Image (tube, grey):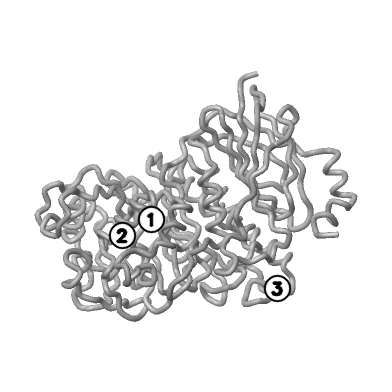
Amino acid sequence: MNRREFLAATPAAAVAAAQPAAITIDPKPLFDISPYLYMQFMEPLGITDGSVEAAWDYDTDDWRKDLIETVKDLAPDVIRWGGLFSRYYKWREGVGPVASRRPMRNYVWGGLETNRVGTHEFVDFCRRTGAEPLYCVNFLGDGVHYGEGRTGDAEEAAGWVSYANDPDNPERKRHGVSRPYGIKLWQLGNETSYGRQHFTLEETITHTISFAKAMRARDPSIQLIGWGDREGRGELWAGELLKRAGEHLDYVAIHMMGMSPRRRDTVLRGIRYQKDPQAAWEELLELTTVVEKRVVELEQVLTAGRFSQGIAITEGHLSLQPHNANPILCEWLSAAYHARSLNIYQRHGAKVKIATAADFAGTRWTVNAVMMQTPRGVSYLLPVGSIMRLFKRHNGKQGIAVQAPPDLDIAASRTGDKIFLHVANLRYRGSVQAAFSVAGMRIVSGRVFEIAPEDLRTAVSQDEPDVFAPRERAISNPQAAAWQFPAGSVSAVELEVAPL
């Protein structure tokens, strides 16, 4: 008897099967889901993780084909270039003839960057994978000085906007690119408030205004993201920033970083979780309450100030020891955190417009969405990437309300006559059977796309890159539509509906 057969034979499962729980859907649209909601985050990580340099195939002088194919399948809405790297990045070193591009020191992450990947190459990557490019500009180094001449001022950022978006920019044309790139999204710096060596709130507001004015003078249509997170345990900067500089901004950013164990006896350090995987599952679910608390806190600031700007969570991932390399993130055990976090972002989609739940592509960090085999081979999705792909591929354009049993975490959306549900069964053991109903409508047909490993410790690797590929199944009886969600599963449900 396998695991599912054993659980199905228990009295609890028998009772659940006889009395299915109710998933009740209100199809009234509540808000538009942002076209930028599912973001990825690319940063040259030096010697810590091959990242961008490993993604470039020097034999073909192009992006690795396997990476392009994997990212096209993932289909992120946005890919962001920047991070801590943006504090000393000089964009002009990454444009023009490759032979004349000078290498640069990667101060934070170690080693040298060749600048083989610059503006043209990054935008090309985004276009080939269907994503919008988002650039972090060098915001006076976020107040940190890493090397002589490495900070960038407002005029330098404005020059980058001109290079990218001015149809008649002579510098870009000299480099053989006649048409503008049309880059819409720009973030002012990266993490301005983290640490005493960075800018104060007053300095951040002053520089935000000067950068925004200079950049918008070159292209008034660009969308700007300002920094709204807190320093230490103080208040969020977002309220005061938007009060005094909000006319220049479209989004306010925080990072969902420091998502680390709260328990003193945590099993999420090293490989302790392997002795008690159920405790790890439950502890990861506890951490998602921090995600929701932070989102709600920023929502309340925006609501209280009657600010119209959206929330941009431009970085975020689990922070487990060993740093960026905990093996649990390769296992389905981590799905509890990833699925619920992504659902939280979408449920708060009236305000959350950009969100990321992982770093992007790399060679060793398990906080990435995409892992690359090196020096060559295959690229594959880690569990967080597989869940992102599933939710992004099966999603509506408008958020709607749903009521569900406590063991099922659901975000619901709609496009026309289709209802979409992102469902995570939060139970480590035991399936949940639930019946669907849509207020004022009947269900015509339904499909479920399900990731449900028999063993929640199943891991993805270069030898089994598709182990978390979803399985598609039809709902057999739409007139009494119901589904049994396996323990620990993550599913996307599509329901075709019609008026009663």
SS at mark 3? Answer: helix
Left or right: 261 as drawn, with respect to 170 = right
Residue 44: x %, y % from top left: 36, 70
Viewer-closest of 210 and 468: 468
Report which residue position mark 3 lands on. Answer: 274
Residue at the image position 27 percent from the left and 71 percent from the top: 88
SS at mark 2? Answer: helix
Quarter of the image for the N terminus: give it: bottom right
Residue 495: x %, y % from top left: 62, 33
Left or right: 332 as drawn, with respect to 414 = right
Report which residue position mark 2 lands on. Answer: 122
- At label 3, which amino acid type do we have? Gln
Viewer-closest of 255 and 479: 479
User: Which circle's residue, 2 or 1, is located before the other in the chain?
Assistant: 1
User: Which circle's residue, 3 or 1, is located before the other in the chain?
Assistant: 1
Q: Residues within 10 Å of mark 1 (few under 14, many from 20)?
A: many
SS at mark 1? Answer: strand
Residue at the image position 31 percent from the left and 59 percent from the top: 122
Tag in front: 2 or 1: 2
Viewer-closest of 174 and 319: 174
The answer to which image quadrant residue 20 occupies is top right
Kindly check if marks 2 and 1 are in contact, taking CB atoms under 8 A apart as contact: yes
Tell me if residue 219 comes above or below residue 199 in the rendering: above
Report which residue position mark 1 lands on. Answer: 79
